[in-house]
């Protein structure tokens, strides 16, 4: 079963912005990479029902 993940951006001023909802872990990772390529901000993917963060990007733009 594919979970839905919500992608968020951590802004430099400390705020967070919702960027997308993606079905499937691999699809969420691909979208994180795409977003990170366009910004130096940190992004993360979360499964909201469980609050599990499944991936993050950092300054080197590589999802963990």
Image: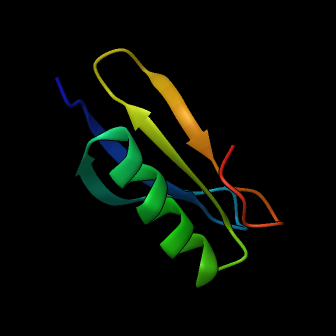
Image height of 18 relative to 52, above or below: below
Indicate left or right for 52 with 11 as reference.
left
Which residue is located at x 37 percent, y 40 percent?
25
Residue 29 vs residue 21, the one in the foreground: 29
Where is residue 2? Give x, y as percent.
20, 31
Which residue is located at x 61 percent, y 80 percent?
37
Which residue is located at x 16 percent, y 23 percent?
1
Which residue occupies the extreme right position in the image? 60
Which residue occupies the extreme top position in the image? 50
Where is residue 16? Give x, y as percent.
52, 55
Indicate left or right for 21 with 41 as reference.
left
Which residue is located at x 72 percent, y 68 percent?
12
Which residue occupies the extreme bottom position in the image? 38
Residue 29 vs residue 15, the one in the foreground: 29
Image height of 47 relative to 37, above or below: above
The image's colouring method is: rainbow
Where is residue 45? Give x, y as percent.
47, 43
Q: Quadrant of residue 61?
A: bottom right
In which quadrant is the C terminus drawn? top right
Count of numbered badges drawn on the protein: 0
Indicate left or right for 1 with 19 as reference.
left
Q: Quadrant of residue 51?
A: top left
């Amino acid at each position: 079963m594919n979970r839905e993940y919500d992608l968020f951006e951590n802004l430099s001023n400390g705020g967070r912005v919702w960027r997308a909802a993606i079905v499937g872990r691999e699809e969420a990772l691909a979208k994180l990479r795409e977003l990170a390529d366009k910004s130096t901000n940190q992004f993360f993917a979360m499964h909201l029902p469980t609050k599990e963060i499944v991936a993050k990007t950092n300054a080197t733009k590589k999802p963990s």
